[in-house]
């Protein structure tokens, strides 16, 4: 049977075991990969150790494409079957608590020198090569609404904003501008959503920074939702507005900033329309109900 396509049952078994290891990995608990593999082999259909190891790498690649965390010891290997991505999605759908798990990266306020986040270049400006198998990534992402998932995960969004707030204050303290650090405001928390940004901060020279925070546990190219109002504010105040993208949040948060115009970096796709009822002037003119 070895060398034949993996069945849905086999994919479900290895994905379940992978997440058992990943849960320990994220929590910092020890586990032995070989022991997991030996326990899994009798439940599969004559799969070799090498085949199982490679499948683990395929699962890492699928999770990365789905904007989720993966086991760092299993380097993502592309060209996985769509049926494997389906198995990962099935597991995620059966285990919603995994998506909404609390973050381990809530900032410890009072230690500003340790709270700055590494901020790199946006993917569009880095010198790295474009991702391989981009079509496979897009197809996998469509199986699981990862942008919508992050948007609906209020705990993740709030934790990301809190972490970004601590980063802004730490950066200003580090620049010798404690006076400005004390004036940084968590606008979405204090005033509610609707301003078109989450944090009001400053550059060290005193220039205003209006920061919209988008957080994911996935990698840097994980898609995200952005509201019409946020886009409008980015256009109205381009010299002040910044999109602060936090990624790899559940492990070791990293970030990059996007400055307007947004369409220089991302493709904006309309995903919904508001429907207002028409004001009917002549009810006899109706053609249908």
Image (cartoon, helix red, strand yellow):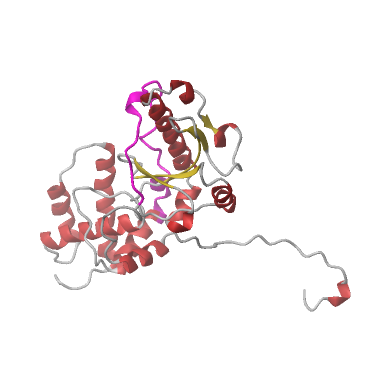
Question: Residue 48 or 202: which is nearer the viewer?
Answer: 202
What is the span of residues highlighted in magenta in the rendered image?
93-122
- Seen from this angle, which residue lies furthest front? 205
Left or right side of 56 for 288: right
The number of discs equals 0
Magenta run includes residue 177:
no
Q: Quadrant of the C terminus?
A: bottom right
Left or right side of 90 for 179: right
- Seen from this angle, which residue lies furthest bottom? 287
Give coordinates of residue 84: x percent, y percent: 29, 64
Question: Residue 79 or 231: which is nearer the viewer?
Answer: 231
Q: Quadrant of the N terminus?
A: bottom left
Relative to residue 287, is residue 42 depicted above or below? above
Residue at 24%, 57% in the rendered image: 14
Magenta run includes residue 114:
yes
Residue at 12%, 49% in the rendered image: 34
Give coordinates of residue 57: x percent, y percent: 21, 57
Give coordinates of residue 211: x percent, y percent: 49, 40
Question: Residue 183 or 5: which is nearer the viewer?
Answer: 183
**Principal secondary structure, stretch drawn in magenta:** loop
Relative to residue 87, is residue 3 depicted above or below? below
Location of residue 280 by image quarter: bottom right
Residue at 27%, 58% in the rendered image: 61
Question: Residue 287 or 161: which is nearer the viewer?
Answer: 161
Give coordinates of residue 97: x percent, y percent: 41, 45
């Amino acid at each position: 049977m070895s060398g034949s396509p993996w069945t849905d049952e086999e994919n479900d078994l290895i994905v379940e075991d992978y997440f058992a290891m990943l849960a320990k990995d994220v929590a910092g608990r020890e586990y032995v990969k070989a022991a997991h593999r030996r326990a899994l082999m009798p439940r599969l259909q004559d799969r070799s150790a090498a085949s199982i190891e490679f499948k683990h790498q395929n699962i890492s690649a699928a999770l990365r494409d789905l904007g989720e965390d993966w086991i760092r010891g299993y380097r993502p290997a592309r060209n996985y079957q769509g049926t494997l991505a389906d198995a990962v999605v099935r597991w995620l759908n059966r285990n919603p608590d995994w998506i909404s798990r609390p973050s381990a990266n809530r900032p410890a306020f009072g230690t500003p020198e340790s709270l700055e986040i590494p901020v790199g270049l946006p993917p569009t400006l880095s010198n790295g090569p474009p991702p391989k198998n981009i079509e496979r990534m897009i197809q996998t992402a469509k199986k699981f609404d990862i942008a919508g998932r992050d948007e609906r995960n209020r705990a993740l969004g709030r934790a990301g904003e809190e972490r970004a707030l601590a980063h802004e204050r730490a950066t200003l303290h580090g620049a010798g501008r404690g006076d400005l650090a004390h004036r940084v405001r968590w606008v979405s928390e204090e005033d509610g959503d609707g301003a078109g940004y989450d944090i009001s901060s400053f550059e060290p020279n005193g220039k205003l920074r209006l920061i919209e925070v988008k957080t994911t546990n996935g990698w840097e190219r994980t898609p995200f939702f952005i509201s019409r109002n946020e886009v409008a504010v980015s256009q109205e105040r381009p010299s002040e507005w910044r999109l602060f993208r936090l990624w790899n949040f559940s492990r070791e948060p990293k970030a990059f900033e996007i400055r307007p115009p947004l369409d220089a970096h991302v493709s904006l796709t309309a995903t919904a329309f508001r429907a207002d009822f028409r004001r009917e002037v002549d009810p006899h003119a109706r053609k249908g109900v």
